[in-house]
Amino acid sequence: MTGQKMAGTTSRGPKVNLTTSSPAETRRLGRLIGKQAAPGDVILLQGDLGAGKTCFTQGVARGLEIKGYVMSPTFVLVREHRDGRLPLFHLDLYRLDNLAELSDLGLDEYFYGPGISIVEWAEKGRGLLPQGHLMIKIEIAPDNVRNLTIEATDDKHRRIVQHLKNRLKNAGSKIAD
Ligand SMILES: Nc1ncnc2c1ncn2[C@@H]1O[C@H](COP(=O)(O)OP(=O)(O)OP(=O)(O)O)[C@@H](O)[C@H]1O
Ligand SMILES: [Mg+2]
């Protein structure tokens, strides 16, 4: 049968694995992606508490030339930053109690508008988040190391993976400044 996945494969699109060794490096990776960001991009973040999702988002904000400090939207589900090259909608679903709360936010304005959206704890929004996105999974390893898997699920987002792959090809295993 065509299109059937083989047992054990979970990959859906082009993918790149990389490692950061400090918060500054994770922010740098975010900045690089922020510079590449285009209207309607959606970045979903998964990773345990303290993995570096907010740290990464701060880098994206810098890449979008947003001036203010980007902190985790802990007591609200979304923070909007509109003073950069593109609007940034930063969602954090950690405290989401039910999916109805999420649909009440009017998500389409974020996901299908002119800005870019980043969602921390994206696994909690399952079903309500766009199918086409960049998925970034962050795993905590010893000594401040973070292992990241970055995967595009549609054609719109694959350019970001391709850009990172090109950077890695030229700069070895690290994302250079
Ligand atoms: N390589 C690294 N990349 C990112 N953060 C790192 C790294 N090494 C250590 N850290 C530390 O890990 C923490 C990451 O915090 P951050 O708030 O970004 O995590 P988070 O994934 O957003 O957590 P939460 O789920 O609570 O929102 C910071 O204290 C940072 O200094
Ligand atoms: Mg956070």
Image: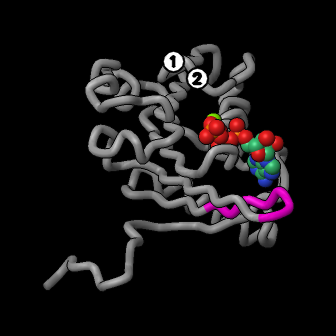
Question: Which element is circle 1 on?
Answer: loop
Give the residue number, with chain letter if any, for mark 2.
73
Q: Are marks 1 and 2 in contact (CB under 8 Å)?
A: yes
Quarter of image, res 66 = top right
Q: Is residue 4 above or below residue 164?
A: below
Mark 1 surroundings within 10 Å by alpha-carbon count, few (fewer than 14), some (14 through 19), many (20 or more) = few
Q: Which mark is residue 128?
A: none
Give the residue number, with chain letter if any, for mark 1.
76
Mark 2 surroundings within 10 Å by alpha-carbon count, few (fewer than 14), some (14 through 19), many (20 or more) = some
Task: Tell me the residue at 64%/20% (across/down).
Answer: 84
Task: Tell me the residue at 73%/59% (across/down).
Answer: 146
Residue type, numbered disc 2: Pro
Q: Is residue 156 magenta?
A: no
In the shown orientation, is residue 171 left or right of residue 12? right
Ligand 1 is found in the corner quadrant, namely top right
State which region is magenta: 142-148
